[in-house]
Image (cartoon, helix red, strand yellow):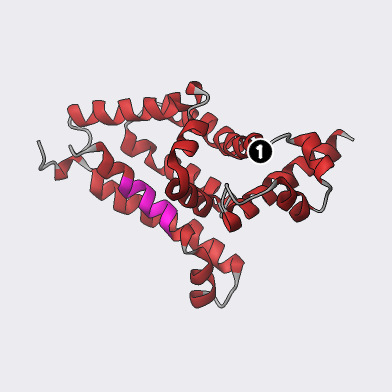
Amino acid sequence: MQKNSKDIESQILEAAKTVFVRKGYNATKMGDIAKEVGISRTALHYYFRTKETLFGAIFGQLLDEFLPNISLILEKEGTLLEKLPLLIDQYVTIISKNPSFPIFLVNEVNRDYEHLLATILKDNNQLKPMNKLKEQVLKEMKEGKLRKMPLLDIIFAYVSLIVFPMLVRLPVTQLFFEDNKEECQQFFIRRKEVIYDILYKFLAPERNTLT
């Protein structure tokens, strides 16, 4: 029974992602999600009483996958450049497993970024790994282990290389892989090496030209 409950909960979360991407948070009704799963609204409310709870659960699921692993990576010995392959692999793996999430995130940022931010900030402990990463970046810039630049430049470079391709995943699959999703998936996995090469050259201290 417990296994069945977990299966249904997972189906609800996946269905919610699909409907949120399709309709946006405001326009989505709990009945839309129940219909997508193929269960009654009463059954849906047994697992998630409100749309806000469901919205938060989606982020919680993604953060639970990502943050414990990034914490383990940051605790390892070595510079950020040495940890970079592990960080890239972690991001690409999670986004590949949740291909609808980048579209959903961009839609919600443009629709109501304050609501999205409030959801993320509900638990400050969830942000500790990201703050630790920021501290290491700034420390290594000061020590000359990373190229000095505005932190936002690093964030945008990192996110654009990893997230943007996922935003155009559907047309890429159709136009370049004849709608073969498996081949497209392998392409995105191989891109990890390309992403690393670009970011390494971008962040390497020998390119230190800014003060």
Residue at x 59% of width, y 58% of height: 22
Extreme-right residue of the structure: 1
Extreme-top residue of the structure: 125
On screen, residue 108 above or below 67: below
> Where's residue 117, x and y in %?
45, 35
For mark 1, what is the residue?
Answer: 54
Helix, strand or loop status at disc 1: helix
Residue at x 41% of width, y 57% of height: 164
Image quarter where the N terminus lies is top right
> Where's residue 184, x and y in %?
54, 66
Relative depth, front residue between 146 and 56 = 56
In magenta segment, residue 31: no
Residue at x 38% of width, y 36% of height: 83
Relative depth, front residue between 65 and 15 = 15
The type of residue carrying mark 1 is Leu
In magenta segment, residue 159: yes
User: On the rendered structure, is 63 left or right of 208?
Assistant: right
User: On the rendered structure, is 210 left or right of 79?
Assistant: left
The dominant secondary structure in magenta is helix
Residue at x 50% of width, y 56% of height: 189
Question: How many marks can you see?
Answer: 1
On screen, residue 154 above or below 74: below
Relative depth, front residue between 32 and 182 = 32
> Where's residue 211, x and y in %?
9, 35
Residue 64 quadrant: top right
Relative depth, front residue between 118 and 182 = 118
On screen, residue 91 above or below 166: above
- Range shown magenta: 156-164
Local packing at callout 1 (Cα closer than 10 Å; few below 14, some 14-19, many 20+) is: many
On screen, residue 157 above or below 73: below
